[in-house]
Image (tube, grey):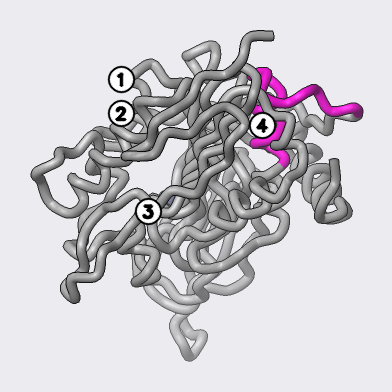
């Protein structure tokens, strides 16, 4: 087996067999304090692909930060082939402020590939793009729902692309979604470079969710097995996911107090009531209705809504009942799993 190549990130050269923490400079704060993006480069002794794993591109989405922390504790990385670029906090400004955005309210995930002389968002995007994405063969970017919006663990990617579809399948969450590429997103930028990339979405902003974290870690390890960075597990834990045909947000038909909500992961039928919305005195009541048969893959946890607020994200499948079974099995598996398995 050929030996691995060294990799240079910023000013640091990481040689095969080395594992180095790097603080990639990104900006200076008002206080003239330098701000940097913390990352770890694990350069395996033997040749293999380079994989980047990033989190907190939206600074308040924290499950991925914990997923990467746990990944880096895994002993199996000692015998890993290829190179792992682990970046737990991409949007360092947003992370400090517990905010999705950068201080100028820009969304980092609409700022790629950015530029070295642009706004804070453009510079941060550009640095990440040049130092990480452009040096990788594959990428996984970890996200959660927004504040008060909980996403059922799901992967998104350009599934028309064969390699990405394979990565999405092996990640082993029940639902995979063929998502259109948004301009300025990290994914658009990776696609331009021909780097197959997955988005993992699970849980909600500013919270840790144990099942989302475990499933994300398991998914990353599965991908690392598939692309030859890790040896195949003795008892691979896989679910065969189902591809969503389409997804759609169901919005509040009126403003008010939201009650009797269906659970995340529920199977719903067209015309079924998903929640009721009433005024605080309970006089007027309106229902949010499922527009088609599907599974609830995202849900607002806030019991208040303005008319038009997104309440439920519903996904349509060829076989809704199959997905319902998968979701139940998946939740049970990750609930029982010991924290440091395999
Ligand atoms: Zn996000």
The dot on residue 37 is: 3
Neighbourhood count class around disc 1 (C-alpha, 10 Å): few under 14, some 14–19, many 20 upward: few
Estimate the spatial distance between the alpha carbons at disc 1 and disc 2, rounded to whole Å: 5 Å
Question: Disc 1 designates what residue?
Answer: 192
Residue 231 colored in magenta in the image: yes
- Quick check: can you spot residue 268? no
Q: Quadrant of residue 69?
A: bottom right
In the image, is residue 111 above or below residue 232? below
Residue 171 is marked as 4
Q: Position of residue 66 (x, y in %)?
A: 60, 57
The secondary structure type at the circle numbered 1 is helix
Above-or-below relation of 163 to 106: above
Position of 39 with respect to 64 (left or right) is left
What residue lies at 14% left-to-right and 41% top-to-bottom?
A: 116
Q: Are marks 4 and 2 in contact (CB under 8 Å)?
A: no
Does label 3 or label 4 sit earlier along the sequence? 3
Residues at marks 1 and 3, CA–CA distance in whole angstroms: 24 Å
Q: Which residue is mark 2?
A: 189
Residue 69 in view in this figure: yes
Q: Earlier in the sequence, mark 4 or mark 1?
A: 4
The reply, left or right, for residue 153 in relation to residue 57 is right
Label 2 CB sits under 8 Å from any ligand 1 atom: no
Viewer-nearest of discs 3 and 2:
3
Q: CA distance from mark 3 to mark 4?
A: 27 Å
| Range of residues picked out in magenta | 218-234
Q: Nearer the viewer, mark 3 or mark 4?
A: 3
| Corner quadrant of residue 122 | top left
Whether label 4 touches label 1, CB < 8 Å: no
């Amino acid at each position: 087996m050929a030996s691995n190549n060294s990799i240079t990130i910023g000013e640091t050269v990481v040689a095969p067999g080395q594992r180095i923490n790097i603080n990639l400079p990104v900006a200076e704060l008002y206080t003239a304090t330098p701000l940097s993006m913390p990352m770890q480069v694990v350069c395996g002794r033997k040749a293999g692909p380079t994989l980047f794993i990033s989190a907190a591109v939206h600074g308040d989405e924290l499950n991925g930060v914990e997923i990467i922390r746990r990944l880096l504790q895994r002993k199996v990385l000692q015998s890993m082939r290829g190179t792992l670029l682990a970046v737990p906090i991409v949007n360092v400004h947003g992370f400090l402020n517990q905010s999705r955005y950068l201080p100028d309210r820009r969304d980092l995930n609409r700022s790629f590939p950015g530029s070295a002389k642009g706004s804070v968002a453009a510079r941060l995007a550009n640095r990440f793009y040049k130092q990480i994405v452009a040096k990788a063969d594959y990428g996984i970017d970890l996200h959660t729902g927004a504040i008060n919006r909980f996403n059922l663990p799901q992967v998104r990617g350009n599934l028309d692309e064969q390699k990405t579809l394979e990565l999405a399948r092996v990640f082993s969450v029940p639902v995979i979604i063929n998502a259109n590429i948004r301009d300025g997103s990290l994914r658009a930028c990776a696609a331009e470079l021909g780097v197959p990339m997955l988005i993992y979405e699970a849980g909600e902003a500013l919270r840790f969710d144990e099942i989302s974290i475990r499933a994300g870690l398991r998914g990353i390890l599965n991908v690392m097995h598939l692309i030859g960075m890790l040896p195949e597990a003795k008892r691979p834990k896989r679910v065969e996911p189902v591809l969503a045909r389409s997804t759609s947000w169901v919005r509040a038909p009126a403003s008010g107090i939201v009650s009797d909500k269906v659970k995340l992961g529920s199977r719903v039928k067209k015309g079924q009531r998903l929640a009721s919305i009433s005024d605080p005195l309970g006089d007027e009541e309106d229902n949010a209705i499922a527009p088609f048969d599907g599974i609830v893959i995202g849900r607002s946890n806030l019991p208040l809504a303005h008319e038009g607020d997104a309440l439920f994200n519903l996904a349509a499948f060829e076989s809704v009942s199959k997905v319902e079974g998968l979701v139940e099995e998946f939740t049970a598996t990750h609930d029982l799993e010991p924290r440091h398995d395999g």
